[in-house]
Image (cartoon, grey):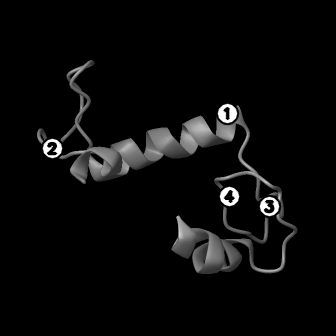
Amino acid sequence: MEAYIDRHRRVLLEHAADPGTLFVKTVKLTSKDTAYCQNTFYEAWRLAIQRYGIHNPRTGRGAIKGLLRVWEAA
């Protein structure tokens, strides 16, 4: 968390104002808003699960069974 707050967050925000939320989006030409709302966070989470094939044992979906979510891997 310290590395994210001290270094990585600044890279994501570039010159945009800090929205004061824990998770932020990268600044793009089409979007200067760096804050996630409930809908945009859910969409980003859903796409990450699809992209990296995280298996959801509750639904039985996911490409790679046994691939753990980040917080379960530690």
> How far apart are the two marked residues, 4 and 1, measured between alpha carbons?
13 Å
3 or 4: mark nearer the eye:
4
| Residue 65 at x, y percent in the picture | 12, 38
Tell me the residue that label 2 is attached to.
64
- Ranked by sequence position, the earlier of labels 3 and 4 is 4
Q: CA distance from mark 3 to mark 1?
A: 15 Å
The residue type indicated by label 4 comes to Val
Residue at 46% x, 38% y: name it: 46
Q: Which mark is residue 39?
A: 1
Mark 4 highlights which residue?
Answer: 24
Residue ID for mark 3: 31
Which of the pair 44/11 is nearer the observer?
11
Q: CA distance from mark 3 to mark 4?
A: 12 Å
Query: Residue 26 lies in what quarter of the image?
Result: bottom right
Which of the marked residues, 4 or 1, is nearer the chain's N terminus?
4
**Crowdedness near tag 2: few (<14), some (14–19) or many (≥20) residues, C-alpha within 10 Å:** few
Image location of residue 21, percent across then percent down? 74, 51
Q: Residue at x 42, y 49 (%)?
A: 48
Return the residue found at the far front. Answer: 2
Could you say which disc has been placed on residue 51 in the image? none
